């Protein structure tokens, strides 16, 4: 069993979820609220995890996490937390459940409207100690189990970021066996989310060589070594699942130095509750477009990225990602995902205000985002 202590304490290996009881005890949590989704409840995974706890633990479950978590869902979970007298939170699921859980941990310990704590409104300095949180990812994508951010669709319709070291789970329990039931399409989409994190973190102009090294290692595991394709082709390949979960965790470790325009564009699309678009799929589709856009603003980083992907120094990383998306069975453009041209102006306005745009290596205006969305339409 590996214990990673890079940003928080991460228990990492096959079967690690059996450690949940010990982890809760270590943090003094006796009445946790599990934030999860109905799919995992129907699959029996929430029950299986709960069955590993001793009788000393009284577990409550909130399973109404949306695909893209909303402030209204956070408020419902807060009501459950308070009604059941909970003293901590367990996040079980993908990025949505973990983002919701972080927002709940914040909301039960801070007064006022959740939007007041978002990064764009100076919320970073307003966030202090939150309810104790343990995260158990069931996908290999967001790496939210080790990150300090949470993305929530607020009641005003904007998809905004909460960010603070206080929001980082105290302990992450990474058990690759929990991902073996993911269908190929979701394995592909979440895997490309992890790859995008690693790449955008590398390209961020912020100076943090250790974070870049971690991101490049994640790219090597997922792309060069072929573990993403292997996991898509055979979901029971435990070795590939192990390396993809590590790549996802590394992606979030790396993006401590920031993300970029891919995420700004994805956040804007993800805020549309009618489209209900998957964040990782959006990242995969937008990544080649932004690699083209950033090409002359990254110094030697494309050569380093190419080496990590197993390509020649002068290869085109954007073309390689386009081919990888095709091999994974992901959409070639956002038109295939249901985005229409008349939505572009609104999307570009949202993207230009998104906090991730400020660490893109090339500044991007609203009009440039409009052009990028046009390109991504295909």
Image: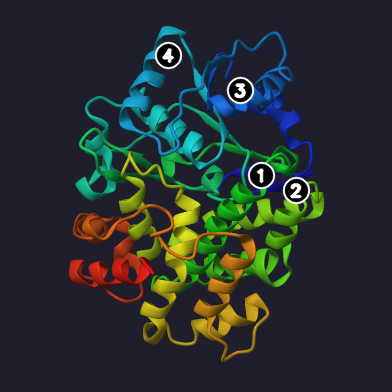
Quadrant containing the C terminus is bottom left
Q: Which residue is mark 4?
A: 80
Q: Residue at x 66, y 63 (%)?
A: 222
Which of the 4 image quarters holds residue 232? bottom right
Whichever of labels 3 and 4 marks the residue nearer the N terminus, that label is 3
Residues under numbered marks 3 and 2 in contact, where contact means CB atoms less than 8 Å apart? no
Where is mark 2, residue-wise? 235
Q: Which quarter of the rendering shows the N terminus?
A: top right
Per the model, the C-alpha gap separating discs 1 and 4 is: 31 Å
Residue 183 image label: 1
The residue that appears at 19% across and 66% down in the rendered structure is: 366
Q: For numbered disc 3, what is the local secondary structure?
A: helix
Looking at the rendered image, the disc whose residue lies closer to the viewer, 4 or 2, is: 2
Q: Secondary structure at mark 2?
A: loop
> Residue 333 versus residue 356: which sits nearer the camera?
333
Q: Helix or strand or loop: what does disc 4 sit on? A: helix
Q: In the image, is residue 167 above or below residue 283? A: above
x then y, percent, for residue 341:
26, 61
| Quarter location, residue 223 | bottom right
Q: How many marks?
A: 4
Query: Could you tell which of marks 4 and 2 lies nearer the N-terminus?
Result: 4
**Residue beneath the point at 21% across and 57% down:** 342
- In the picture of the structure, the residue carrying the numbered disc 3 is 41
**Is the Cβ of the residue at disc 2 closer than 8 Å to that at disc 1?**
yes
Question: Distance of mark 4 from mark 2, alpha carbons?
Answer: 35 Å
Q: Disc 3 and disc 2: Cα gap in Å?
A: 20 Å
In this rendering, is residue 213 above or below 113?
below
Sequence-first tag of 3 and 2:
3
The residues tagged by marks 2 and 1 sit, at their Cα atoms, a distance apart of 7 Å
Comparing 231 with 57, the one in front is 231
């Amino acid at each position: 069993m590996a214990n990673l202590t890079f940003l928080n304490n991460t228990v990492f290996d096959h079967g690690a979820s059996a450690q949940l009881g010990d982890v809760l005890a270590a943090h003094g949590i006796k009445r946790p609220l599990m934030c999860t989704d109905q799919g995992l409840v129907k699959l029996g995974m929430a029950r299986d995890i709960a069955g590993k706890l001793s009788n000393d633990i009284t577990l409550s479950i909130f399973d109404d996490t949306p695909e893209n978590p909303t402030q209204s869902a956070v408020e419902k979970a807060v009501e459950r937390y308070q009604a059941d007298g909970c003293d901590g939170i367990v996040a079980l699921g993908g990025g949505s459940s973990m983002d919701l859980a972080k927002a709940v941990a914040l909301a039960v310990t801070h007064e006022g409207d959740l939007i007041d704590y978002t990064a764009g409104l100076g919320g970073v300095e307003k966030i202090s100690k939150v309810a104790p949180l343990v995260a158990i990812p069931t996908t290999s994508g967001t790496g939210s189990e080790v990150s300090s951010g949470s993305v929530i669709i607020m009641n005003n319709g904007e998809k905004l970021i909460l960010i603070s070291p206080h929001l980082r789970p105290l302990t992450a329990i990474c058990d690759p066996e929990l991902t073996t039931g993911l269908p190929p399409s979701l394995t592909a989409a979440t895997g490309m989310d992890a790859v995008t994190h690693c790449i955008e973190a590398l390209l961020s102009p912020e100076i943090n060589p250790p974070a870049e090294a971690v991101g490049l290692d994640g790219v090597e595991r997922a792309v060069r070594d072929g573990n993403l394709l292997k996991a898509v082709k055979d979901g029971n390949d435990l070795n590939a699942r192990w390396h993809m979960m590590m790549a996802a965790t590394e992606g979030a470790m790396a993006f401590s130095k920031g993300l970029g325009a891919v995420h700004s564009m994805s956040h804007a699309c993800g805020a549309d509750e009618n489209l209900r678009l998957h964040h990782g799929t959006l990242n995969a589709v937008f990544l080649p477009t932004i690699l083209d856009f950033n090409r002359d603003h990254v110094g030697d980083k494309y050569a380093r990225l190419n080496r990590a992907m197993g390509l020649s120094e002068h290869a085109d990383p954007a073309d390689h990602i386009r081919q990888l998306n095709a091999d994974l069975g992901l959409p070639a453009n956002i038109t295939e995902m249901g985005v229409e041209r008349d939505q572009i102006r609104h999307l570009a306005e949202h993207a230009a205000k998104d906090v991730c745009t400020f660490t893109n290596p090339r500044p991007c205006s609203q009009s440039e985002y409009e052009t990028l969305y046009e390109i991504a339409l295909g």
